[in-house]
Image: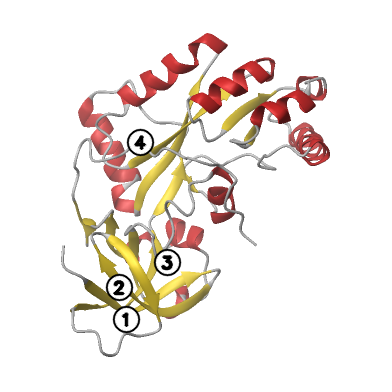
Amino acid sequence: MANYLIENANILKEKHLDKASLLIKNNRIVSVRKSYRKLTVMKMDANKFIMTPSHIIYDNRLPLSQPFQDMKNYFINNYLLKGCTAFMTAAAVRYENELAACLKNLRMSLLNSPVDMILAVKIQPSLLTPAFIRKCKKERVPAIFVEINSEKDISLLPWGWIREAMFPYNSPLIPVFSDEAPRIRNRLKEIWKQIMLGEKIPAIDGEMIGNEPISQSVLAKIGIYPLKSYLNAGGELSYNLYWKSREIKNIEETALYHYHNHRLAVTVHRGTVIRAGGEVLFRPGFGEHVTIKTPSFFALP
């Protein structure tokens, strides 16, 4: 594919707009500069828009057992119309020897996904053993959700052995607190943070909220960033364009997702326009299973 230039892009970075131009080749970002004055290629002026990476969300409620039409409507309404081009979800695993089969079944259930997927696992603390961690490394599982019901669930685990087994892949552990009482949840969260810090375990401090864009710091810890959500040289060409207005000049990406979806004009997924205005392109099976080579490798400052 011929080179082309996205000029005057207002890229949202940490609540501020950074004006830049992006040189594109073969659906990848080749370089990013303030301007390319002498470049003679096809150009697209993005000055009227705010550009963000396309959203990546954590989805723990995928309707996997529903008919195709229901799944299609779900992806259109919750992904394509909201500027989401990838998601992370988790396979529930009860026994160590079921890991590979659970991941395979989840992949098979998502064969018609129009967006990319990152597959984690969700387990009870009793399954968090060195042997299970080694199997997760073999399967390239980028994150492990741990369901926590009580302090005893995590305080008695052999964390030193677990840390050794995690190295060097280091899939971060992500807590899931079962108790709904705020006081108990906050107590368990604090205990979790203290153990993870004291034992030097790669982990996410708090729970991940379902159907919410994953923050860039968490994307980096899991290893999704900079494979995705990276509007810089070498990055994948996946982005959203929102119509500019005064009210969304100093705003976070999450707020755009929740409160300004009516301003979303264009979504591009790996170089293909999948939303233009109110029209979406649903392509079953276009989504790819994203393999994370090294979680926690790229740390944000």
Q: Which residue is mark 1?
A: 47
> In the image, is residue 291 above or below residue 83?
above
* Circles 3, 4 touching at the beta carbon (< 8 Å): no
The CA span between labels 4 and 1 is 33 Å
**Above or below 122: residue 266:** below
Q: For marks 3 and 2, give the CA distance.
A: 10 Å
> In front here: 127 or 65?
127
Q: Residue beneath label 3, please?
A: 232
Among numbered discs 3 and 2, the one appearing first in the sequence: 2
Q: Is residue 2 left or right of residue 235?
A: left
Query: Disc 3 or 4, which lies upstream in sequence?
Result: 3
To which residue does mark 2 refer?
23
Dot 1 amino acid type: Asn
**Residue 243 point in image, percent of width and height:** 33, 72
Which of the two discs, 4 and 1, labels the residue nearer the N terminus? 1
Q: Is residue 296 above or below residue 16?
A: above
Q: Secondary structure at mark 2?
A: strand
Label 1 SS = loop
Q: Nearer the viewer, mark 1 or mark 2?
A: 2
Q: Which residue is mark 4?
A: 289
Residue at the spot x=55%, y=42% of the render? 295
**Of the image marks 4 and 2, the number of the one nearer the N terminus:** 2
* Amino acid, disc 3: Asn
